[in-house]
Amino acid sequence: MFGLTFDKLLIIGVIAVFLLGPERLPYYASQLARLVRTLRDLASGAKDRMREEMGPEFDEVDWKKLDPRQYDPRRIIREALLDDEPPVTPTTAPLEPAPAAAATAPSLEKPKSIQASTDERLRRLAAGETAAPPFDLEAT
């Protein structure tokens, strides 16, 4: 929380006690308690208002699932990239060894999964189906 540790907060409290003095300290302590109470009431009022506006679905929402601290960007990207992959089916035929020249030359063709998905989109659009606007898979 803003780089404040317990030690720093304790030092700030001791300095505040010396600056305020014993005459004004009770007044400012009550003001701080009033501020904390007001903030707590404000937060509970916002929660009650949200519950009113959302209705019974409010209690069904899993709030821990929506916590942004749980997200791992690497996992999200990995899952997004792996979701579009078709399931790999094992082949029973033995694989033929590739020629040495073909193995070292880079392939300029699209991967089969991207080509298949592009062909499927084009087929649907040609058939007149409405679909999401096409996008360039290689641009991202």
Image (cartoon, helix red, strand yellow):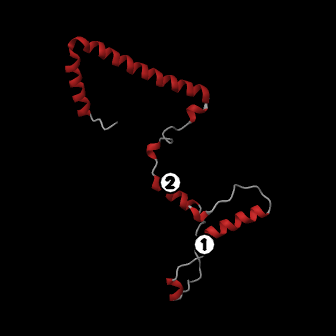
As drawn, the residue found furthest toward the top would be 23
Horizontal side of 51 relative to 29 (left or right) equals: right
Q: Is residue 97 visible?
A: no
Residue at 43 percent across and 23 percent down: it is 40
Going 53% across and 88% down the picture, which residue do you hit?
A: 99
> Which residue, as the protein is rendered here, is positioned at the far front?
19
Number of other residues with Cα within 10 Å of mark 2, as a class: few under 14, some 14 to 19, many 20 or more: few
Q: Position of residue 91 (x, y in %)?
A: 59, 77
Q: Residue at x 34, y 19 (%)?
A: 32
Residue 86 coordinates in the image, percent (x, y): 61, 66
Give the residue drawn at x 50%, y 42%. 65
Q: Position of residue 14 (x, y in %)?
A: 21, 24
Type of amino acid at the residue the image marks with label 1: Lys
Q: Residues within 10 Å of mark 1 (few under 14, many from 20)?
A: few
Does residue 47 appear in the picture of this structure? yes
Q: Which residue is mark 1?
A: 110
Q: Secondary structure at mark 2?
A: helix
The mark total stands at: 2
19 over 94 or under it: above or below: above
Asked whether disc 1 touches disc 2, contact meaning CB atoms under 8 Å apart, the reply is no
Kindly report the distance in space between the C-alpha atoms of the residues bearing marks 1 and 2: 24 Å
- Where residue 73 is drawn, which disc sits there? none
Q: Residue 45: x and y, percent?
A: 51, 22
**Which tag, 1 or 2, sits closer to the chain's start?**
2
Amino acid type indicated by mark 2:
Ile
Residue 99 vertical placement versus 72 (above, below): below
Quarter of the image where the N terminus is located: top left
Label 2 belongs to which residue? Answer: 76
Looking at the rendered image, the disc whose residue lies closer to the viewer, 1 or 2, is 1
Residue 51, quarter of the rendered image:
top right
Could you tell me which quadrant the C terminus lies in? bottom right
